[in-house]
Image (cartoon, rainbow, N blue to C red):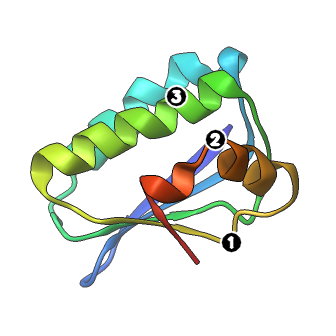
Amino acid sequence: MQYEIKTGSDAIHLTISGRLTFAEAIHFPQVLSELAASPSKGPLEIHLSQMDFIDSTGMSLFVHIYDWTQSVGAKVTIHKASGPVYAALDRAAFNTLFEFK
């Protein structure tokens, strides 16, 4: 898993690429820490066009993002999830937690 966080004037942009699995989960608390430290408290836009695989542990990490954004009152939009990543998130009904674009 590689990630990049950019704070724009309108939103926080989190881009995740590669795989998000049990093996990469150990690095995810750093992502949450960086998001929480962001000076912008606007909506969070998660860009997944470069993510090629997610397992159940990876999906549980998105639940942590959901919990955090709910606690700070931020909206989350997932952009360009496709292939097996979109299929996994769709099967798990993540559209009930996040808006997909």
Whether 39 is drawn above or below 89: the answer is below
Q: Quadrant of residue 74?
A: bottom left
What amino acid is labelled 1 in the image? Lys
For residue 67, side relative to residue 54 (left or right): left
Q: Residue 51 appears at what percent x and percent y?
A: 75, 52
Q: Which residue is mark 1?
A: 80
What amino acid is labelled 2 in the image? Ala
Q: Residue at 24% of width from left, 41% of height from top?
A: 68
Of pointers 3 and 1, the one earlier in the residue sequence? 3
Q: Residue 64 appears at what percent x and percent y?
A: 37, 33
Q: Quadrant of the N terminus?
A: top right
Alpha carbon of mark 1 to alpha carbon of mark 2: how far? Answer: 17 Å
Q: Residue 13 appears at what percent x and percent y?
A: 43, 67
The reply to whether the C-beta atoms of the residues labelled 3 and 1 are less than 8 Å apart is: no
For residue 51, side relative to residue 95 (left or right): right
Please identify, in this view, whether the residue under mark 3 or under mark 2 is nearer the observer.
Answer: 2
Q: Residue at 46% of width from left, 55% of height from top?
A: 96
Callout 1 crowding tier (Cα within 10 Å): few <14, some 14–19, many ≥20: some
Q: Which residue is mark 2?
A: 92
Q: Quadrant of residue 10?
A: bottom left
Alpha carbon of mark 3 to alpha carbon of mark 1: how far? Answer: 19 Å
Please identify, in this view, whether the residue under mark 1 or under mark 2 is nearer the observer.
Answer: 2
Name the residue nearer the viewer: 11 or 56: 56
Q: Which residue is mark 3?
A: 60
What amino acid is labelled 3 in the image? Ser
Of pointers 3 and 2, the one earlier in the residue sequence? 3
For residue 15, side relative to residue 41 (left or right): right
Q: Secondary structure at mark 1?
A: loop
Counting the numbered discs, the total is 3
Residue at the right extreme, as displayed: 83
Q: Secondary structure at mark 3?
A: helix
Alpha carbon of mark 3 to alpha carbon of mark 2: how far? Answer: 10 Å
